[in-house]
Image: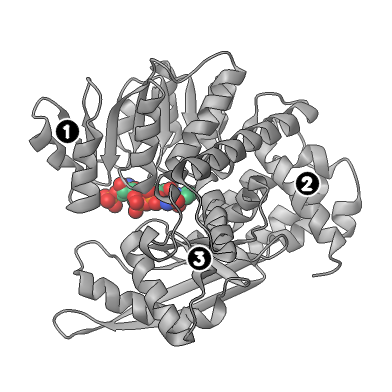
Amino acid sequence: MKKGEVMNSYIERVIKEVESRNNNQPEFIQALKEVLTTLEPIISSSDKYEKNAILERMTEPERIIMFRVPWVDDNGKIQINRGYRVQFSSLIGPYKGGLRFHPSVNLSVMKFLGFEQIFKNALTGLPIGGAKGGSDFDPKGKSDNEVMRFCQSFMTELYRHIGHDVDVPAGDIGVGGREVGYLFGQYKRIKNAYEGGVLTGKAISYGGSLARTEATGYGLLFYMREMLKEHGNSMNGKTVTISGSGNVAIYAAQKATAMGAKVVAMSDSNGCIYDENGINLDCIKEIKEIKRGRIKEYLECNPNAKYIEKTGANSPIWNIKTDIALPCATQNELTLEDAKILVANGVIAVGEGANMPSTTEAIDYFLEHKVLFAPAKAANAGGVATSAIEMTQNSIRYYYTFEEVEQKLDTIMTNIFKACKQAADEAGISGNYVAGANIAAFKKLSEAMIAQGLV
Ligand code: NDP
């Protein structure tokens, strides 16, 4: 919806109702408003959406599970965390979405992520519903044994709510291969059954898919390639800044480099590094994937690089001049203030690797200034799409090669871009892939909802 336009009365009513019912959940309301305010063209086209209460149903999770997670730390002290699983929608497949372990996890964050996931998963074209889960547990600084005891306790409750045809969790912030392994081991032990497809993001040795680790970052770059191509441009020769230095950021950097771009900056929650000759990814991988260290340690690799400490609320990485910015860390990490600096410095495209990393005001500013903008639910869908390919391999008891999985991922991301473009073109807002993604996903979900009756 463009600024100043009157909102459709049905959309307006539902936003008000959801706001009053969830008034202490700012991230959820933000995600929901971002979607609903772009659905004007489709909602206004028929009264069937209001008659069937589509928006009311789509904004209320099918089920929310919250539970206590007791565990014992290395000093023998009892610790208590809170676990969550928001099973938002099973319309088009089993609930599917990652688990996040981070101190900032709360019900609002879980619901925003679960809500986004429904739309993202619909865009992949694969049979997966939407969910999200996690805990306010902080794996940082914990020993392997502490992480294992936490994961075992977490799964001791979660196992009764999941299953390969019911709900299939995966990783997210703070949940990588190590955590998925401990979770899977405990699930298998409790169920006394090898249900390979109950979790994705597994290691290759026990049922994981080749290219799953790389998938979200690679997928983001495939989407960027398509979006730039549509506008007569490419990644080749561009400078790129990427926030974060976790799973998504590292493989986004790898693929951007392979496409001929130069990644000059990456970050973590303490600060960012700037290396004008291009970041050495082997160093980043060593620091983050093996040592689980801080990005500042990059200076040991290249003393000529610069480290800029994060001092205020905003990340210093957005002050660096770049052609392409890829926020790949966390929600609301790119604000209006940051967007203004990026635009003033000549950014041409922004691609969201993280979930909801740009504030609504920042997105509006980019769109108003004709910056190409790849929204998270489309651009980072490669991770969950490859998780669905992992489920397929577990079901057929067969493994695809790395090249086969990457090719499927490339095709899926290309199709997602096409769907976003087509929906935006049909709505008369060509180039607005934020609205395009939301409308394309909504179309599919609302059709399924109407077909299945009052569920
Ligand atoms: P990781 O845990 O591997 O890495 C997260 C990175 O983001 C780290 O560099 C971390 O820095 C930084 N970060 C996390 N929280 C904050 C914060 N509050 N402020 C600043 N920096 C922060 O996570 P992923 O790479 O898996 O996930 C990153 C984003 O991508 C998330 O939004 C996630 O939901 C999204 N995503 C992930 C997918 C996947 O397949 N993994 C799929 C689709 C989306 P530090 O180490 O200092 O905390």
Give the residue number, with chain letter if any, for mark 3. 169
- Residue at (32%, 47%) from the top-left corner? 246
Picture quadrant of residue 87 = bottom right
Look at mark 1 in the image and give the residue it sits on.
307
Judging from the image, what secondary structure is the residue with disc 1 in? strand
Task: Decide: is 327 above or below 429.
Answer: below
Label 1 to label 3: alpha-carbon separation: 36 Å
- From mark 1 to mark 2, how far is it between C-alphas? 46 Å
N-term mark: 1 or 3: 3
Q: Residues within 10 Å of mark 1 (few under 14, many from 20)?
A: many
Which of label 1 and label 2 is nearer to you? 2
Quarter containing the C terminus: bottom right
Which label number is shown at residue 90? none
Q: Earlier in the sequence, mark 2 or mark 3?
A: 3
Q: Secondary structure at mark 2?
A: helix
Query: Which percent across, then down, holds residue 81?
Result: 35, 76
In this view, the mark in front (2 or 3): 3
Q: Position of residue 339 (x, y in %)?
A: 44, 28
Q: Nearer the viewer, residue 386 or 73?
A: 386
State whether residue 365 appears in this view.
no
Residue 180 is situated, as x and y percent measured from the top left of the image, at 38, 66
- CA gap between label 2 and label 3 equals 25 Å
Is the residue at mark 1 in contact range of ligand 1, meaning its CB lies under 8 Å from it? no
Residue at x 51% of width, y 45% of height: 405
Estimate how packed mark 3 is, as few (under 14), some (14 to 19) or many (20 or more) residues with alpha carbons within 10 Å: many
Residue wearing tag 2: 443
Considering the numbered disc 3 on the image, is that residue within a helix, a strand or a loop? strand
Q: Earlier in the sequence, mark 1 or mark 2?
A: 1
